Image: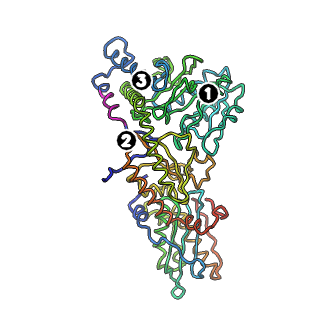
């Protein structure tokens, strides 16, 4: 059987929208176009009702109360609102934030901004497997600490941080805990109460919903958390995020959450079986290594370095047919390899040689078979072309060579 | 990033991949770049002593498609040239031929460096002084 090309295995970047989500959204563009804030007529009422229902669907997926959901334009905005909003709101308590080096740029760059505003930020290192050291976290807390911002599941390596343990430490010291759970919500069970989360960012387009809509969960009880609005205007979303509600997007987000709620468990099992098969087959290649902890990992993600071949060169061998991403410098404008892989202590050479696979709801066994074949062929072909592979095979220690850095 | 047709062709059908016997006096080897930077090129020339012409050239490259294409093209251009003629190959000729975008110009610079390093290796082996090479920006 021939497989339909190209194959999409970059579901950490974005997921295709589930057709059932689109179906739910469609009436809210033309027919039910009202502004959810229009309280005085049926057009507004219909829109408001749809938003309320979606808010329930979203809240249910994460075990929250609907009133604790603030809709945003996506996870980046939610990250900004959480960090900047807490920094402003709790300024009288302190100005210190703890985060870690493998966070998404939306968190790291927001923290850099906080530093410019006079805040103090501790960037915790991660261990070789990508997990933070809880002892280090606790040691970093000072009497000025107001927020711990540690992600749930990492976008590049899929490593899941010990969120419940982190929140216990945060509670013990009276510090708020924010987590960017963009890659985790809808993929694995996330419960804001069981996990002790005070604020949480997530996004629809990573869970088969539309782009341009996300949410910030803000705890209302034990403790009651408040954030200073970063978008001023009509006082929407309980004053925390002004701006006309993206009604079709929010409806789609709600539907996407409902589908994840119903299908997540089975889907996670199916994807982890496929992921493990892909990984096992690719590791049959010599000098191939998995990056990140494999026991605490999202079920649909794997990140592998194929030593002695360069990631972009590798992708070029199949990227017309298979969509994945690489930690190679060449795939970014900066010419710097992945800061996440470097944070694990990987040498630049291994970071340059990495591929990230993100499986998803629509990934099939046939696609995995094709991918295994294509990637193995390309790695072997490029190694025949690689001077480093030849040297490795001759037993030359590459670290002993004085390379001309440029 | 979209690659030019020529880059794709060199990547898919690289010319002159391989290894020459570097212990031979008429073989010059240049190894440039660094694994940490994401590209390493090894380029070799074999000089026919009777005619003074480069009779064979081989490469192996660790790097992106543009790096592979740059070195593949360089080996094609080297064959049949004298060593002196080979020195005149400029990285911008490679950029032009392969339509490399600005972010990939360093690949062509590396290929030029590899050519010069191979020539210098050949010169030193044959009792000639190494040439002073100007530094190009990568």
Residue position marked by numbered label 2 in the rendering: A362
Disc 3 crowd rating (10 Å Cα; few below 14, some 14-19, many 20+) is many
Q: Is A322 inside the magenta-drawn segment? A: no
**Mark 1 vs 3: CB contact within 8 A:** no
- State whether residue B95 appears in this view: yes
| Numbered marks: total | 3
Residue lying farthest to the top in this orientation: A40
* Majority secondary structure of magenta residues: helix
Q: Which residues are magenta?
A: A17-26
Rendered position, A99 above or below A227: below
Q: Gap in Å between the C-alphas at discs 2 and 1?
A: 34 Å
- State whether residue B105 appears in this view: no
Q: Is residue A16 left or right of residue A384?
A: left
Picture disc at residue A167: 1
Rendered position, A319 above or below A104: below
Residue position marked by numbered label 3 in the rendering: A57
Q: Judging from the image, what secondary structure is the residue with disc 2 in?
A: loop
Q: Gap in Å between the C-alphas at discs 1 and 3?
A: 25 Å
């Amino acid at each position: 059987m021939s497989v339909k090309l190209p194959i999409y295995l970059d579901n950490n970047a974005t997921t295709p929208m589930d057709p059932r989500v689109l179906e739910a959204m469609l009436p809210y563009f033309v027919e039910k176009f009202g502004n959810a804030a229009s309280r005085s007529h049926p057009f507004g009422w219909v829109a408001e009702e749809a938003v309320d229902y979606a808010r329930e669907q979203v809240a249910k997926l994460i075990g929250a109360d609907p009133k604790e959901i603030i809709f945003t334009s996506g996870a980046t905005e939610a990250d900004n609102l959480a960090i900047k909003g807490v920094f402003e709101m709790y300024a009288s308590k302190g100005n210190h934030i703890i985060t870690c080096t493998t966070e998404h740029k939306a968190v790291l760059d927001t923290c850099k901004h906080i530093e410019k505003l006079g805040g103090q930020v501790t960037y915790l290192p991660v261990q070789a497997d990508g997990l933070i050291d809880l002892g280090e976290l606790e040691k970093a807390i000072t009497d000025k600490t107001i927020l711990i911002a540690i992600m749930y599941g990492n976008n590049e390596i899929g490593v899941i941080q010990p969120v419940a343990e982190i929140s216990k430490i945060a509670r013990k010291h009276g510090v708020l805990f924010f987590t960017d759970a963009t890659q985790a919500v809808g993929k694995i069970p996330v419960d804001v109460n069981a996990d002790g989360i005070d604020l949480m960012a997530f996004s629809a387009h990573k869970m088969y919903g539309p782009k341009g809509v996300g949410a910030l969960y803000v705890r209302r009880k034990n403790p009651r958390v408040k954030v200073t609005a970063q978008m001023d205007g009509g006082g929407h979303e309980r004053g925390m995020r002004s701006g006309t509600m993206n009604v079709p997007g929010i409806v789609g987000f709600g539907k996407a959450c409902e589908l994840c709620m119903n299908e997540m468990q089975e889907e996670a099992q199916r994807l982890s079986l496929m992921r493990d098969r892909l990984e096992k087959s690719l590791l049959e290649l010599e000098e191939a290594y998995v990056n990140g902890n494999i026991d605490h990992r999202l079920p649909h993600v794997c990140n592998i370095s194929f030593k002695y071949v360069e990631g972009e060169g590798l992708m070029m061998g199949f990227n017309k047919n298979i969509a994945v991403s690489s930690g190679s410098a060449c795939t970014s404008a900066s010419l710097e390899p992945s800061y996440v892989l470097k944070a694990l202590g990987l040498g630049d050479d291994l970071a340059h040689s990495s591929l990230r696979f993100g499986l998803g709801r629509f990934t099939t066994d046939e696609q995995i078979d094709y991918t295994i074949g294509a990637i193995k062929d390309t790695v072997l072909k490029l190694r025949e072309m690689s001077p480093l592979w030849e040297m490795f095979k001759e037993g030359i220690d590459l670290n002993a060579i004085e390379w001309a850095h440029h | 990033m979209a690659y030019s047709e020529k880059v794709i062709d060199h990547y898919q059908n690289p010319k002159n991949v391989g290894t020459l016997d570097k212990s031979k006096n008429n073989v010059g080897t240049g190894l440039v770049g660094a694994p940490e930077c994401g590209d390493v090129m090894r380029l070799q020339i074999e000089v026919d002593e009777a005619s003074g012409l480069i009779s064979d050239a081989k490469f192996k490259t660790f790097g992106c498609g543009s790096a592979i294409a740059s070195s593949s093209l360089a080996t094609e251009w080297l064959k049949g040239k004298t060593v002196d003629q080979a020195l005149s190959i400029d990285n911008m000729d490679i950029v032009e031929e392969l339509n490399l975008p600005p972010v990939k110009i360093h690949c062509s610079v590396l290929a030029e460096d590899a050519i010069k390093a191979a020539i210098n290796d050949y010169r030193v082996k044959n009792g000639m002084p190494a040439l002073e090479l100007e530094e190009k920006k990568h």
